[in-house]
Image: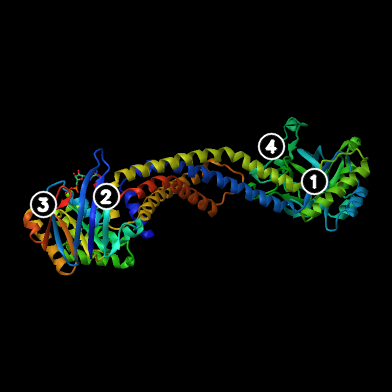
Amino acid sequence: MKLPDLIATGWLEIRSHKMRSFLSVFAIAIGIATFFYTLSILSQRYRDIDRTAEVSGKGRLDTTVERPLSMDQYNQLLRMLPPQASLSFQTDEMFTSATYKGQILTGFFLQGLLPTWQDSAFVYQVEGRFFNWQDIKNKHRVALIVVYPREKEPRHISSVDSGPAGSVQLQDFIKHINLLNQSITISDQSFTVVGILRAPPVEKDFRAPEDQESMQKIFIPYTTWYDIAPRWWDSFSTRVRIVTGSEDKAARATSVLHSFLRQQFGPDFLPGIRLFRHQLDIYRQGAWHNLKAMIFIGLIAMIAGGIGIMNITMVVIFSRTREIGIRRALGASRLDILLQFLTEAMLLGLCGAAGGMVLGYLAVLHMANNTSQLTFSWWVVAASVLLALGTSFLFALYPAYEASKLRPVEALKYE
Amino acid sequence: MVIHCEHLVKIYQTADAFRALNDVSLDIAPGDFAAVMGPSGCGKSTLLNILGLLDEPTSGVYRLNDISTADMSDRVRSRTRRDHIGFIFQSFNLLPKLSVLQNIALPMRYGNLPRKDILPRAYELLQRVGLADKADRTPQELSGGQCQRVACARALANRPELILADEPTGNLDSKAGEDILSLLRDLNRSGITIVMVTHDDKIAHGAKHIIRMKDGEIV
Ligand SMILES: Nc1ncnc2c1ncn2[C@@H]1O[C@H](COP(=O)(O)OP(=O)(O)O)[C@@H](O)[C@H]1O
Ligand SMILES: [Mg+2]
């Protein structure tokens, strides 16, 4: 019998027992829904992590040194690194306040950056300009302010909610007043706001969590920061970030950084250098780990679904023994009978897959209030269909084989 | 179709090892129309099932067109049934969920005829048994006589050389029975070999010769 005829025969049978068919594919549908949901979320997470890798730069490594580092040290380290490597220092965060035309602005951290900060995980739209090396060299009094889209705004910094009387959260203030090219006072020094950095909306921000600001920030040049930092500044730390461009260069840069830090701070200095690639692996494992239980539930449901299919195939064969006999008399071979019941079971599986995917998709839409945009992926559909077909095939194999073994005379006599 | 049987024995594996066929030897020539008669339980159906490759004898030789059937695989037996033998049963054995036309098409679905030629041929066969207007009916909507005519059309689907009919008129009134008999006689005249089991003397006399059985033996 040819495939279209097998399908037509199976479909007729399924349609003429709608309730029975529905009940028998129920568990398959639940299983497929679970898998569809899990795989959709998982593939979304992996895709996000891949984008994070893209945004963050290739061959990147990070460390935090519990000391301030000078520009001399910067240049010394840069000479040791492979050519084309980008080196960025970032100061500690300082909690302070600013004044604009007599208005006290609070609720932000002040941090010093170098121009190379832009080389990794830079997702902002710049209004005005970023820092340049002149700003660093001459310790210019220039500042950048980050503006967040509404859904991404950092929480108000609670300790300053009860700040000086008449003070305003910077975050609220910049919603109404554009500070670009305005002059603000920080630590009695006058700064010009040369740039506004607009952070992307949540679903387009693929930075790693460690690259995202969790607080409202004002950035100033790295050198300027140390100029206005308080006396106890030598207890501050420095974040060092190197983007080399490739993973093997990153390995070399790790040992360079290691020996540099020991040379600076003594042989006992134990820097914790993190390869960004490892960080990404941890994210991937985390994504998988969170969904492992779901996969397990899906697997159980699929086994239940398979047993449902097996059960219904046995019932169907029992109630259609005479039909098997008739078909055999008309010339159906054992293989024809086997294929007929396998096709029917797989059609049932397919119905389960269709129902399951609809359920799964609804679950993805309503239950996963994911931060990033959900995209429909065909491989998840393909995997779900294959899984349903495979399960029903496997579980129908035994009953279908038994049916094919029925002897024609006996099947024909069956009432 | 040449049928040649020697010393066929069929023993059912019941408690008393019942001998349904006891040393049956039989030859049927191509173009013959044989009626098998005998009391109920004498082994007529058993013989017909063996001739139709639906069952196997316990011992003895059955050669079909001079080919021994003992060594045939299930595949070859199925193909032989499909391409060379047509069955007609007492209880029609139509599939209740399929339309009359689809029932007739069924043997062709297992054959090598191109799909597009199947339904036209089924329709042709339906015309031949005079039921062209019933193509879309289901078997339940037909009378017994009409059902048996559909079964005859189905038996002809793959142009068999042999038709085996097990009490084809057993469930029919005499008028319908005679219709079926005349249909079978037509088919026989066109060259198809027919072996028919029957209880009915009148029907049996429509055949070319009669084989009488008793207690698993030919008498
Ligand atoms: N599968 C079977 N198992 C045991 N006995 C059987 C079986 N099939 C038929 N018989 C017995 O064999 C004998 C012949 O049966 P059958 O060929 O059907 O007779 P009939 O001449 O009425 O068609 C009967 O007595 C019947 O009871
Ligand atoms: Mg009988």
- Residue of label 1: A62
Quadrant containing the N terminus of chain A is: bottom left
Q: Is residue A270 visible?
A: yes
- Which is closer to the viewer, label 1 or label 3? 3
Q: Looking at the image, tell me whether mark 2 or mark 4 is earlier in sequence order.
A: 4
Count of numbered circles on the image: 4
Q: Looking at the image, tell me whether mark 1 or mark 4 is earlier in sequence order.
A: 1
Q: Residue A238 versus residue B124: which sits nearer the camera?
A: B124
What is the chain identity of the residue bearing mark 4?
A
Where residue A370 appears, as percent x and y from the top left, is: 59, 43
Labels 2 and 1 positioned on one and the same chain: yes
Mark 2 and mark 4 in contact? Answer it, CB < 8 Å.
Answer: no
Scheme of image coloration: rainbow
Task: Give residue A155's mark.
Answer: 4
Badge 4 amino acid: Arg
B53, above or below A171, in the image: below
- Residue of label 2: A409
Badge 1 amino acid: Asp
- As helix, strand or loop, the secondary structure at mark 2 comes to helix
Labels 3 and 2 positioned on one and the same chain: no
Label 2 C-beta lies within 8 Å of the nearest ligand 1 atom? yes
Residue B42 falls left or right of residue A384:
left
- As helix, strand or loop, the secondary structure at mark 1 comes to strand
Mark 2 and mark 1 in contact? Answer it, CB < 8 Å.
Answer: no
Where residue B197 appears, as percent x and y from the top left, is: 15, 55
Give how far apart the Cα atoms at labels 2 and 4 are.
Answer: 80 Å
What is the chain identity of the residue bearing mark 3?
B
Q: Residues within 10 Å of mark 3 (few under 14, many from 20)?
A: some
Q: Residue at x 51, y 51 (%)?
A: A381
- Residue of label 3: B199
What is the chain identity of the residue bearing mark 1?
A
Give how far apart the Cα atoms at labels 3 and 2 are.
Answer: 21 Å
